[in-house]
Each structure stands twice: as structure tokens, then as C-alpha cells.
Amino acid sequence: MTEMTDTLPDAPVETAPPSRSVLFWRAVIVLVPLIFVVFLALRLSTAKTEHRAEGMAPALRFTTFDGQTINLGDLRGQGVLVNFWASWCDPCREEAVLLEHTWRREKGKGIVFLGLDYLDQEPAAKDYLAGYDITYPNGPDLRSRVARRYGITGVPETFLIDPAGKIVDVIVGPITSQAQIDTYLEKIRPK
Amino acid sequence: MQIRPSQFLRVLLFAFLFLIAAGAALAQTPTPDASAISADQVNAVARGLWCPLCSGVRLDACELKACDQMKEMIALKLAAGASEEEIRTYFLDQYGPQVFGEPPREGFNWLAWILPVLGLLGGGLFLWSRSRRMFQTGPEPALAQDDPPTDDYSQKLEQELSRYD
């Protein structure tokens, strides 16, 4: 049999040109995943810019655990430190005392501290605040709206906003020393 | 009858203590007893929710501290008489649609809802049109064995095959 196939010439294959419907479906099969990939790539590339370490701070409005409404826009002219935290977050506990201590020192001197509780439960959050005797305004970030707008990557994360409303720095992870937080606060202190 | 000052003070003290105790008893609001809720009851609700911090982990299978807190809240809500739907709504308000394990129906996320449907529809239509054409065409008529070969290739094939007869 092998001899026979060796001696035979290649059979001429006559193929009809693909019909319109086949061409259409081929185009659909190729184009749909292609469009999806392009959308995905665009989405991923814009997602990177969601971490707003620079530029004007996105709108921030929330209600504190004790019912006070906070609006970042109302705080223009003051430096603002926005700290994202959660009661289940152990590194957040490392900076809790330092933050509260610094807040008590800075209160009424042109710098405001705000705390946003991320993906947490209110009873646990309130226990956390009471445990560290935290007195600066704190509230739940319901549906993680602010966290998404600020593009946080986890907790703790702290945004420093100058009196003009511009984000001048972001601290990812816990603030470890008084010297560190003081250096950051100097960047947002009203002149 | 004359009341001595020491007796008067004693009565006053008792009255004061009684008022404090009564006030405290009245001020106490009944707190739901979460310990009366079994783990199975909690998990029955937790099974329909997803850990908001993990990717693809159901709440009942999650062992994070945050998930434990969520399960405690489920127990508290159940003890307070909340229905499963009310608990789901509560978590939706707290965490958003991600807690249901599905992408929010907004913006780019619509693609996740639309594309599978489009894919299924497209695939179904494609298969349907292909199968329809296949059945319409039917099998090709077989060549009669006595028909003489019509081209060079067939002639050569016949010659080669005749060598094996």
C-alpha cells in the first residue's frame, strides 16, 4: 500500500469558496473574543490609574458611626489625613495608637483626621474604636464606595490631602513612627 | 410618731437604690441571644454569600476573621428574627453586590452578563445553521461501479487497484 501511495500524484482538491454565512460566522467567532480582549485590556489599563496617589482627591462623603456627616469639600483650607482601616486588620492596630495620639496633638491646628472603616461589621468596628479610644471622625465605607474611588489596595492605607484638595502622598501599610507621620503631616499643613 | 434623722436617711437611701435598680431594669432592652442559633442555621444563610475579601470563596467556607465577624452578624440577625432575605439585603448595603458573588450590573461589568448569553446565542445559531444545511444537502450519490473513470487520477487509481485483484 505504501508503494501505491508513493507513486500516486497528489489528488487535485477542488474546494468551493466559503459561503457568505460561513464567512459571517468566522468573522463573529474571531471578532467577539477580539473585542472582549480589547475591552479587557482597556479596562485593566484604566484600572491602574484608579490608584490616585496624585491629583485632586475624589469626592468623599460619609456618615460617621455617631451620625455626623463628613464632606471632604467642606474641609478645604485644611490638611486632611484619610485613613482606611478595619477591625479585622492586624496591621491597622499597629498604627491606631499613634494616629489617635497625633490627632489629639494636631486637633484645631489646621489638620483633620478621618477614618473609613473598610469591609467591616459595625459592632466589631465600634469595639475597635472604643478599645483604642479613637476620637477623630470615623465611619463605615458602605459598599466600599470611597475605597474604590480612591483605589486602595488594602488596609491600612492613608491618603494625605493638602488644603487645596490635592492628594500629595499615600502611605500603604501601617504608619510606624511619630517621625514618619510628622514628615507626612508637614506636607499638608496649611501655610 | 417621730422619725429620727438617721431613719429618714436610711429610708431615703433605700428609695434611691430602689429607683436606680428599677431604672436599670427598665432601661435594659432585650438583646438577641446569638448563642441560641446553631452553626447550621448560620451556614444556611452564609452559603448564599461570598467573602468580600477573597476571590471565589463562599462565606460558609471562609476562615478569615472578617468572615467570622460576618457569621456572627448573621447569628445576631437570625436571633433578632430577621429573615434570610433581610440579612442578604443588609450585607448588600454593607458590601455591595460582590457579596452575592456576581459582578454589579453597571458599566463595564455588563459585559460579564451579556457575553455568555451572546456566546450561547451565537453558538446555537451557528450549530443550527450548519445542521440545517447538512440535512438539506443530504448524502452525495455514490458513483456506480461500472462507470468508466473520468480523469487521469481516477484512471491511475483504477490501474493500481487492478494490480491487487
Image: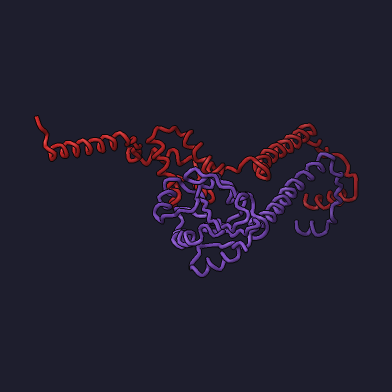
Q: In which quarter of the image is the N terminus of chain B?
A: top left
Specify the farthest residue to the right: B151
Q: Can residue A91 be seen in this view?
A: no
Residue depicted at 11% across the width and 34% down the height: B3
Place of residue B102 in the rendered image (x, y in percent of width and height, measured from the top left): 58, 42
Q: How many marks?
A: 0
- Tell me: A149 left or right of B26: right
Residue depicted at 40% across the width and 50% down the height: A127
- Tell me: A19 left or right of A76: right
- Tell me: B162 left or right of A170: right
Look at chain B in the picture and name its colour: red
Look at chain A in the picture and name its colour: purple
Of residues B5 and B117, the one drawn nearer to the viewer in this rendering = B5
Specify the farthest residue to the top: B1
Residue depicted at 58% across the width and 55% down the height: A152
Place of residue B105 in the rendered image (x, y in percent of width and height, measured from the top left): 63, 40
Q: In this view, does B30 lie above or below B109?
A: above
Place of residue A97 in the rendered image (x, y in percent of width and height, measured from the top left): 44, 61
Of residues B57 and B77, the one drawn nearer to the viewer in this rendering = B77
Place of residue A20 in the rendered image (x, y in percent of width and height, measured from the top left): 85, 40
Q: Is residue B113 visible?
A: yes
Specify the farthest residue to the left: B1
Of residues A21 and A110, the one drawn nearer to the viewer in this rendering = A110
Residue depicted at 53% across the width and 53% down the height: A114
Of residues B6 and B62, the one drawn nearer to the viewer in this rendering = B6
